[in-house]
Image (cartoon, rainbow, N blue to C red):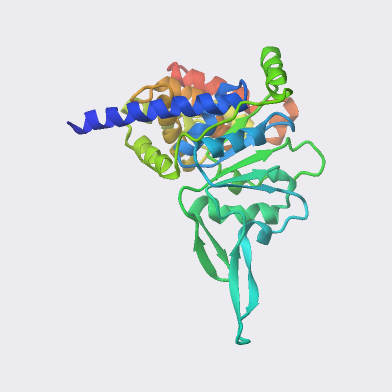
Amino acid sequence: MSDAEDLLSEIDALEAKLKEARASITRRFIGQERVVDLTLSTLLCGGHGLLVGLPGLGKTRLVEALSTVMGLKGNRVQFTPDLMPADILGSEILETANDGSRMFRFVGGPIFCQLLMADEINRASPRTQSALLQAMQEREVTVAGQTHTLDPPFHVLATQNPVEQEGTYPLPEAQLDRFLFQIDVSYPDRNTERAILLATTGVHEDDVHQVFSAQDLINAQTLLRRMPVGDSVVEAILDLVRAFRPDEAGVSDRVAQTVAWGPGPRAAQALMLAVRARALLQGRLAPDIQDVLEMAHPVLIHRMQLTFAARARGESLADLIAATAQGMINGGAAA
């Protein structure tokens, strides 16, 4: 069997497992299939996700279901203003042995898991938020000069309430860039909310079941990186990311007058993985230009900032991304 046939066979097997996983998750997180697909894509890409939405929309419920279905050891940290970095990373404690000798022993915090749910991450101080930076990028933590490696796979799914609410701290730009996707969770429509009422207010609720193991997920992440990507898709990714840098030659007047700073190379890397994940979830061997268009918003929205004047005018990054992406995909001038 050729390498191409092997790849196709492996993708077919993975697609079947993903279909089962999605069906199990949606029994607990009803409706909003796009949110489910984006969280699954986050894990398939080996990245971290930031779920943004008001309280009570099921973000915690989604992460808990995902942990069970993907067979990952999960921990949850409720971020509060008084939370300290050691509460997440762990600390060294002084132990006294039977012979009277003393020594320091490191006790790992909740970050030593495979799927960390950072609940309401923007309620903690910037100092505590930054405790996740090394773990999210290098998959290791350093405490008291000693580096401790996190076992693969390691993912952070953070939830965030809108920053307009009191008692929140906006995430710093460096940390936002570590999140592969920003996943916006909105209110359900009427029919979905009716289904939620019927499913969650009775005596019994549907249970989720494990579909993947940690090793299965690692294998899927490797398989995703083997998926072919055509030159036209690669060029579209580069064109799109570079189109939002206000100092880049040839950008549209709207971008130059609206964007304070644009996405860096990490955004292009994220988009390259994201289009593969979307193709995989839809049962296709390779991504196309439409995948670039569809994944532009979750990849770029948190990696850009409007100018003060643009915010005063009521400009929206979401509208800018949609208009610019559509214009480029169609081969026309950026909006």
Q: Which of 123 and 65 lies nearest the eye of the viewer?
A: 65
Residue under the image location 56 percent in, 22 percent down = 33
Residue under the image location 51 percent in, 65 percent down = 147
Please state the horizontal and vertical placement of residue 65, each as a whole percent of the image: 58, 34
Residue under the image location 36 percent in, 38 percent down = 225
Please state the horizontal and vertical placement of residue 258, each as a whole percent of the image: 63, 30
Query: Can residue 69 be spotted in the picture?
Result: yes
Q: Which of 224 and 259 lies nearest the eye of the viewer?
A: 224
Residue reaching furthest right? 166
The answer to whether residue 330 is left or right of residue 257 is: left
Q: Which of 274 and 265 lies nearest the eye of the viewer?
A: 274
Q: Which of 65 and 201 lies nearest the eye of the viewer?
A: 201
Residue reaching furthest front? 203
Residue reaching furthest left? 1
Split into 4 quadrants, where in the image is the C terminus?
top right
- Number of numbered callouts drawn: 0
Split into 4 quadrants, where in the image is the N terminus?
top left
* Quadrant housing residue 287: top left
Please state the horizontal and vertical placement of residue 263, each as a whole percent of the image: 53, 38
Taking 90 as reference, is 291 above or below it? Answer: above
Residue under the image location 69 percent in, 31 percent down = 53
The answer to whether residue 123 is left or right of residue 149 is: right
* Quadrant housing residue 223: top left
Please state the horizontal and vertical placement of residue 178, each as a whole percent of the image: 55, 45
Taking 196 as reference, is 303 above or below it? Answer: below
Query: Can residue 235 be spotted in the picture?
Result: no
